[in-house]
Amino acid sequence: MTFRWRKWDGAPHWEHESVFLGSDDYGDWVGQRDGWRSARPGVEAPSHGASITLIPASGDYAATINDSHPRIRVYIDIAWDVRWDAGEPVGIDMDLDVVRALDGRGVFIDDRDEWDEHRVRYGYPADIVQRLETVALDLEARVIAGAAPFDDQTAAHWFGVLRDLGSNDD
């Protein structure tokens, strides 16, 4: 399956080759194996190591945890309308990201400049702006605290599921 992102104006954005892993109390999980396709218009970037992505029922973010990426452990895309459509995940990337970097930067909210520019350019509704800014701050605090589902124990479980699916393909 392919996880398809678009921008607020409907323009295509990132697409990630993925596999459905299962669901838990936090939402649905998909995985991406090392070397699988990730691309956006003009950029082809195979995945760097395995990753798992949580799609919560709220639809206002997708949280990716990387297994072996050298710089980023957690990357949460603040989003709108992340959901399943015809058996594949889709969502609108809303620019803000919560990141747990491994290179000394720690946990931070990224792309505030893009958020400020795009909320004016695309005319994001004020209630959505307020909601997603609150979501970003909440997620930042939860990632800093190492709270589930952003903890290593939850990630280890879903990486195990991804590995087991891969061994069934052999």
Image (spheres, rainbow, N blue to C red):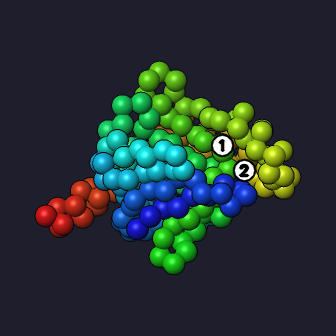
Q: Position of residue 80 (x, y in %)?
A: 67, 59
Q: Residue furthest top?
A: 104
Q: Residue at x 55, y 74 (%)?
A: 85
Quarter occupied by the N terminus: bottom left
- Asked if residue 11 is positioned above or below residue 65 in the image, the reply reads below
Q: Position of residue 3 (x, y in %)?
A: 48, 62
Tell me if I can see residue 4 in this picture. Answer: yes
Q: Residue at x 73, y 41 (%)?
A: 115
The amino acid sitting under disc 2 is: Leu
Q: Residues within 10 Å of mark 2 (few under 14, many from 20)?
A: some
Which residue is identified by label 1? 96
Q: Residues within 10 Å of mark 1 (few under 14, many from 20)?
A: many
The amino acid sitting under disc 1 is: Leu
Q: Earlier in the sequence, mark 2 or mark 1?
A: 1
Callout 1: SS: strand
Res 99 → quadrant: top right
Q: Position of residue 112 (x, y in %)?
A: 70, 35
- Asked if residue 157 is positioned above or below residue 90 in the image, the reply reads above
Q: Residue at x 29, y 58 (%)?
A: 162
Q: Residue furthest front?
A: 42
Q: Residue furthest bottom?
A: 86
Q: Is residue 124 left or right of residue 98?
A: right
The mark found on residue 148 in the picture is none
Which residue is identified by label 2? 132
Quarter occupied by the C terminus: bottom left
Q: Position of residue 62 (x, y in %)?
A: 54, 54
Alpha carbon separation for disc pair 2 and 1: 8 Å
Res 103 → quadrant: top left
Q: Residue at x 18, y 66 (%)?
A: 169
